[in-house]
Amino acid sequence: MAIKLKEVDVVLVGMGWTGGILAKELSEAGLKVVGLERGAMRTTAEDFSVPRIRDDLRFGSRNDLMQNPAVDTLTIRNNPKQDALPMRRLGSFLPGQGVGGAGSHWNGITWRWSDNELKVRTLYEEKYGKKFIPDDMTIQDWGISYAELEPYYEKFERTAGVSGKAGNIKGVVQKGGNRFEAPRANEYALPPLKSTQAGLMFAEAAEKAGYNPFPRPVANASQAYTNPDGAKFGACQYCGFCERFGCESNAKGSPHFTVIPIAMRNPNFELRTNMWVTRVNKDSTGKKVTGVTYINTLNGEEFEQPAGMVVLTAYAINNVHLMLLSQIGQPYDPVSQKGLVGKNYCYQTGAGATLFFDNHHFNPFMSTGGSNFGIDDFHANWDFDRAKHGYIGGATVGGGMTNGRPITYRPVPGGTPQWGTAWKAATAKWYNSAMSIGSSGSVMANRYNYYDLDPTYKNAFGQPMMRMTFDYKENEHKMGKHVAQVINDLAKSMNPVSFNPASVRTSWTVVPYQSTHNTGGTIMGASPGNSVVNKYLQSWDCHNLFIMGANVFPHNAAYNPTGPVGALAYWAADAIKNRYVKNPGMLV
Amino acid sequence: MKDDGINRREFLKGAVAGSAVATTAAVGLTSAPAEAQQKPAAPANPGYSFLSLDEAAFVEAVVDHMVPADQYSPKGTDLGINIFIDRALGGGWGKGDRMYMQGPWKQGHPNQGYQLPLRPAELYRAGIAATNAYCKKTYSKSFDQLPAEQKQEVLVGLQGNKIKFDSGLPANTFFSQMYQTVMEGMFADPIYGGNRNKAGWKMIGFPGVVAVHAQNIEKFRDKKFTAEPLSISDLS
């Protein structure tokens, strides 16, 4: 029997970026807020100090900061005809766990997604005609515009300490930035990071090819910084231990040293760690939620936390899982195409080449999560003619380094023996003489890519696991083929001794690691007929339930998702404190 | 290498098996292997916590074959890769502490990843036994007793799934895990028992856990950066 606790105004499920933002904003507005985090407390001093944090085996290979599949994982398959099987160890993506969530061990790349994405169906239909969008491609407009989000993008960028160079300020193209980005009101919070040799060589080659290279925007502070909330950042040390690691100098914008401790200093906010939320509770009408039920993972005790408002702020997959477990809204069925919860799960695709030189030193260990140059000519560039290639969406291409950690980073030319003296000779020779050109590609929503509850497998709490059905479709194959060609042409133009060419990903596999950019499942939109939440991320079914995270994205762009995740959290927080609290009900 | 390894192993086995009748097993263990004392199997071998005698011989042979002594680094056992593997298998990772291990068990499609009902240490143990059984059947010797060309043949056969184990254990799944641990043992921080003297890092020029490159990234752009690598222990 669950122990019933005293009612609070707001309960937040999960304490990463979105939980932290909501905790700070809503407690400052005078609301009594409880934040529930399934993992442990994390602080820079205790958890991310040098030398312990520089442990590639523990954090890089064994995923010590991530969700533990022994407790909860999901089942996976490529299509509805297959039996889904559990993802028995982490691979393709790495959901975070613990205070700060994945926001404490991301690379920090922070983009603004523009109307190209937010109005995707309208714009493609206008430019290419309705027939250009395949029947099974279930893309839709998001119900929000870039102009509405612009101030919130800026707010998030300043909170997270994003370093970069503006490419378009109020419609005026800026030299050195991304000329294809949507207009910004102001420059980035910080100037760009120092460039690596690989980044500069990529930029030079891209420019020669007629593209428009720019330093990628990233929440790695290029110099010491104090954000508008007073959180202090150290300058990035280019240590090469960024993604999968916490930052010892607080140079990587992370919620565990910004929004969360600020909220914790407010008596209106209470953080409870090691608390696993098992469901969101509804009242008898089903039109309102009443709070959440959770388990203290330290002793198994069950609690019910009544709340006037519930905000789901967990990892994207876990937010959708909680909706399905709580039976809020109708689960999506790909056959009848009825129901919405679980619909439009999307991922990302990619391709990369490794280039080997005999006359360069790249020092891959001197790098950050985002010290790269990129081009957006085949993604945000709306003038890029997709008709020629027959696909929707696009890919960003980048060159540079993120790390030189040798358990996994040991580039050698294709065909090199995998052990013995010849392997050692090649490994020693090329470690410092190779660089890569990579890409990240969008994935358009498809009728047959979705989540539902698994009929067979259960997690440690006896609850049905999430089932993920996903594969790349023809649209992604065409795009992957095109971008691989772009990469290989660039690689050739740089005259390496040799290069391992980029190739298209045809089918999704759970190994190896690819990207933790899982989107969709509780998508946003303009009407309850096509979306789970409205433009304020408010549930159409229960007006006192809000759902944050990339799970609200109706499709996935080539960009990393954290920019709009953060911006939408600030946007929703404003709507909650300025409008909803004064007059609870549907905001649309 | 002759038969030194196997003699010592058989002797140790006999000493343990005979302990019920011997006055104390310790007498036999300390007095007899004079030969082993003169020629220790690996310098500074701190002893095994998980691997049995046959398993240790197999792992030592694998790591010395994959990482031979040459101008790039000392051999695998001198790097402690065998010790790294022993500790990894005996610890939480070997016990599958971060793996979902509930049935039902189906092999599924390769895209669905690892689906065996074996934790890493169990897979290692079963794989070594199956490989040695295969070697005895094919070459009349255990893996560690094979000449280098035949070791190579076996490893390639495992990797490419050309070798089929009678038990049904997929050879390449065992191989992939074993290969991963050899690489980890060569390149992980020395705190885990491998990469002794940071020889794996020295081989490639990885500076280790050094914290500060902000002052170097421009200074050493397109220039070789050399530094004595630092490990967790060096900074602790």
Image: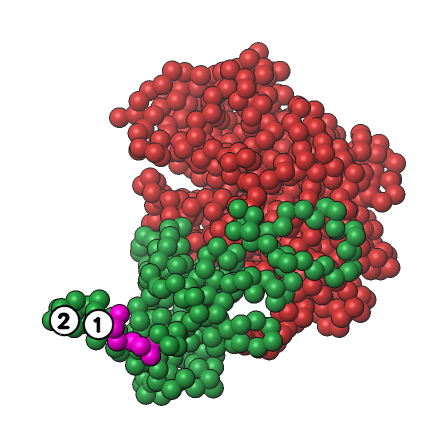
Q: Position of residue A56 (x, y in %)?
A: 54, 53
Occupied quadrant, residue A416: bottom right
Looking at the rendered structure, the number of numbered marks drawn on it comes to 2
Name the residue beneath numbered marker 1. B28
Circle 1: element type: helix
- Relative to A81, say whether B24 is above or below: below
As drawn, is A319 to the left or to the right of A305? right
Label 2 – label 1 distance at C-alpha:
8 Å
Image colour for chain B is: green
- The secondary structure making up most of the magenta span is helix
- Which sits in the foreground, A186 or A520? A186
Q: Which residues are magenta?
A: B30-36
Q: Is residue B31 magenta-colored?
A: yes
Q: Residues within 10 Å of mark 2 (few under 14, many from 20)?
A: few
Q: Residues within 10 Å of mark 1 (few under 14, many from 20)?
A: some
Circle 2: element type: loop
